[in-house]
Image: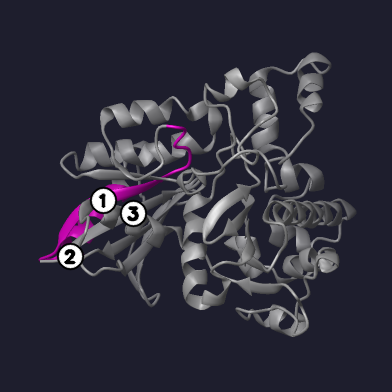
Amino acid sequence: MSDSVLVLNAGSSSIKFGLFDITPAEPKLQCRGLLDEQEKIPRVVVSDASGTQLFEKHRTSGTPEDNDLLNDVFAWIEAYLAGGRLAAVGHRIVHGGRAFYRPVVITEQTIATLEALTPLAPLHQPRCLAPVRAVQALRPELPQIACFDTAFHHNLATPASRFAIPRQFEERGIRRYGFHGLSFEYVASQLAAIAPQWADKRVVVAHLGNGASLCALQNGSSVDTTMGLTPLDGLVMGTRCGTIDPGVLLYLMQGEKMSVDDVQHLLYERSGLLGVSGVSADMRALLASQKPEAREAVDLFTFRVAAEVAVMANTLAGLDGLVFTGGIGEHAPDIRQRVCDRLSWLGVGIDAVANVQGAQRIAAKDSPVDVLVIPTNEEISLARHCRSLLVPGR
């Protein structure tokens, strides 16, 4: 009898999920799906590994809190598995803080500790924990496993891990944690297979999407990253500001008389590409727009990405490879071209034709820095962690 795990990757208004057979050493995708609450009529859709649709259902009544669509997912999976067993549910949790840096079986104490971290990821942490509570209600006997986006960066060392504030605050956990770890971990594993000659090279991975960050890799491990204590820091994002002068925040509260809640809402939900453009947080819409504000937002985005690649190269004492991943990184050749053009002084050059055609290797033949595009897969990272906990040593 084979064992499977269901992994849930919760976003702002949808949950991506995958069902994996964990009997083999490398988890095997059985089917994947999307539970989408954003559509006018919320729905769940499931497809097999080749993309053939297997199941679809729309909500006809009730509210998202009813968990009816998630219950339908469980019912369908249990029928789909037939003689197989659903061994556990794995969850992507954005912030693990100091306490969690490897996958753990979820308990009530785990949930309480993770809920206490909500101020460090106010948009993300509640959305990650909501499916945990939902699964508890629907299948209370089913083990659940938490996997953390901060874990890949757990071994960041000084000075990359520090803020220049009194040491007493670092002792309370105020330090740079980094995020998108499940994505960076997957890309690092792919690099080992795709480009083994990169094993000891100096590599920067650019996870560019609605949320965006960079990771400096040395020997497959994170040695620096652009996000810090929270997912606000670093690059310009869809609705998040990225790095900002702390004095701006003081001015907003003192000069504009904005409350802490108002500032939080501004920085997380009204800034970034949306705030600069006044048009959209969606890079596709901005690239298609003729408005000068949209062009300025795109220019600022690529400027910040290139600037932070240079920072990561400083940490690595050089740059041998650059990898693009994430929704924008994988699907926006114009953004890749603009970023690489800004980095030509650092030896980055790309083949324009290969870039537009969506090739995996897009570096120009004479580029001293290799450039790859690798689609990310956070779900397989989740499945691997779940398997390591459920079948240690097998």
Q: Is residue 366 above or below residue 393?
A: below
Q: Quadrant of residue 29?
A: bottom left
Quadrant holding the N terminus: bottom left
Q: Do the residues under discs 3 and 2 have CB atoms within 8 angstroms?
A: no
Relative placement, left or right, of 42 versus 201 is left
Q: CA distance from mark 3 to mark 1?
A: 6 Å
Residue 109 at what x, y percent from top left? Answer: 29, 27
Say the numbered circle drawn on residue 81.
2
Residue 56 at what x, y percent from top left? Answer: 34, 63
The residue stretch that appears in magenta: 69-98
* First of labels 1, 2 by sequence position: 2
Q: Secondary structure at mark 1?
A: helix
| Circle 2 residues within 10 Å: few <14, some 14–19, many ≥20 | some
Identify the residue at image location x=63%, y=67%: 323
Q: Amino acid at mark 2?
A: Leu
* First of labels 3, 2 by sequence position: 2
Relative placement, left or right, of 356 versus 182 is right
Identify the residue at image location x=58%, y=31%: 175
Quadrant holding the C terminus: bottom left
Residue 30 at what x, y percent from top left? Answer: 29, 69
- Name the foreground residue: 351 vs 198: 198
| Circle 3 residues within 10 Å: few <14, some 14–19, many ≥20 | many
Residue annotated with mark 3: 385
Here the colouring is one colour
Relative placement, left or right, of 318 versus 76 is right
Q: Secondary structure at mark 2?
A: helix
Q: Is residue 324 above or below residue 234?
A: below
Say the numbered circle drawn on residue 389.
1
Q: Secondary structure at mark 3?
A: helix
Q: Amino acid at mark 1?
A: Leu
Residue 232 at what x, y percent from top left? Answer: 64, 38
Q: CA distance from mark 3 to mark 2?
A: 21 Å
